[in-house]
Image (cartoon, helix red, strand yellow):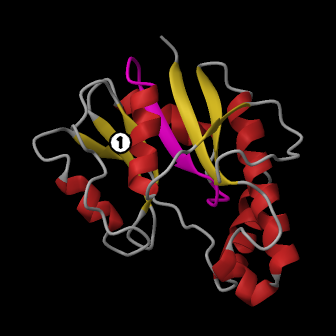
């Protein structure tokens, strides 16, 4: 069975995406950043035939005009942990990875690396510099509630989640930085100039 990548994203709508960033640069610029980052990630993932890619949008029933042909599903109800748990259960028979859409440097190489680790490990995490994580990949041997009691949107999100994986082998892939505020943009722009387009 093919591995599955589920990209979690907000539907690109003016005034509803990257709200902290929008306070600094305005709603239109934040929407452009969100949309551009999401499209680049999806196109990179869809080029890789070793796994299938699914876009999980919130809010449920949201329509989008993204110029990318990709299977779309609703994220469902609940907090981010409950929605990620539902996505993992939907693809229980094989390996599944959930990746966020606001990490400009994330790419298909990261997903391949995460899936490769699942031969030796039960889970792989892509830690974020702020204490959260931008990717989680799970093999068939998963905790019953992998995302239970995590303090989302805090520096404790990864540590809290890892408590649910006690007794299991967990790998970490590269640490990346998400863009939450305008202060994060110059750092990302410098990296992009140094490494070139993805």
Residue 136 in magenta?
no
Judge left or right: residue 104 versus residue 150.
right
Residue 177 position in % (x across, y down): 54, 67
Residue 103 position in % (x across, y down): 62, 59
Q: Is residue 11 above or below residue 160?
A: above
Out of 188 and 102, give the one closest to the viewer.
102
Residue 94 in magenta?
yes
Q: Residues within 10 Å of mark 1 (few under 14, many from 20)?
A: many
> Would residue 198 be seen by someone viewing this image from the given angle?
no
Judge left or right: residue 58 versus residue 67.
left
Tell me which residue sits at (52%, 61%) in the image. 176
Give the quadrant of residue 74.
top right
Q: Which residue is mark 1?
A: 124
Which residue of the protein is positioned furthest toward the bottom in this rendering?
24
Out of 60 and 110, give the one closest to the viewer.
60
Out of 42 and 184, give the one closest to the viewer.
42
Judge left or right: residue 116 versus residue 27.
left
Magenta span: predominant SS is loop
Q: Is residue 27 above or below residue 64?
A: below
How many numbered discs sit on the rendered protein?
1
Magenta residues, start to end: 91-105
Give the quadrant of residue 69.
top right
Give the quadrant of residue 79.
bottom left
């Amino acid at each position: 069975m093919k591995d599955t990548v589920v990209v979690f994203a907000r539907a690109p709508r003016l005034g509803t995406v990257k709200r902290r960033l929008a306070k600094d640069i305005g709603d239109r610029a934040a929407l452009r950043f969100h949309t551009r980052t999401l499209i680049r990630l999806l196109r990179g993932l869809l080029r890789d035939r070793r796994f299938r890619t699914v876009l999980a949008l919130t809010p449920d029933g949201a329509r989008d005009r993204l110029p990318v042909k990709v299977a779309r599903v609703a994220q469902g109800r609940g907090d981010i942990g409950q929605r990620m748990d539902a996505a993992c259960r939907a693809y229980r028979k094989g390996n599944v990875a959930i990746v966020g859409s606001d990490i400009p440097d994330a790419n298909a190489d990261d997903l391949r690396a995460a899936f490769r680790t699942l031969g030796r490990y039960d889970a792989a995490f892509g830690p974020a510099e702020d204490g959260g994580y931008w990717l989680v990949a799970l093999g068939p041997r998963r905790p019953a509630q992998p995302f239970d009691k995590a303090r989302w949107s805090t520096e404790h999100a990864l540590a809290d989640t890892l408590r649910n994986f006690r007794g299991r082998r967990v790998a970490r892939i590269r640490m990346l930085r998400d863009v939450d505020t305008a202060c994060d943009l110059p750092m990302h722009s410098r990296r992009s100039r140094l490494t070139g387009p993805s």
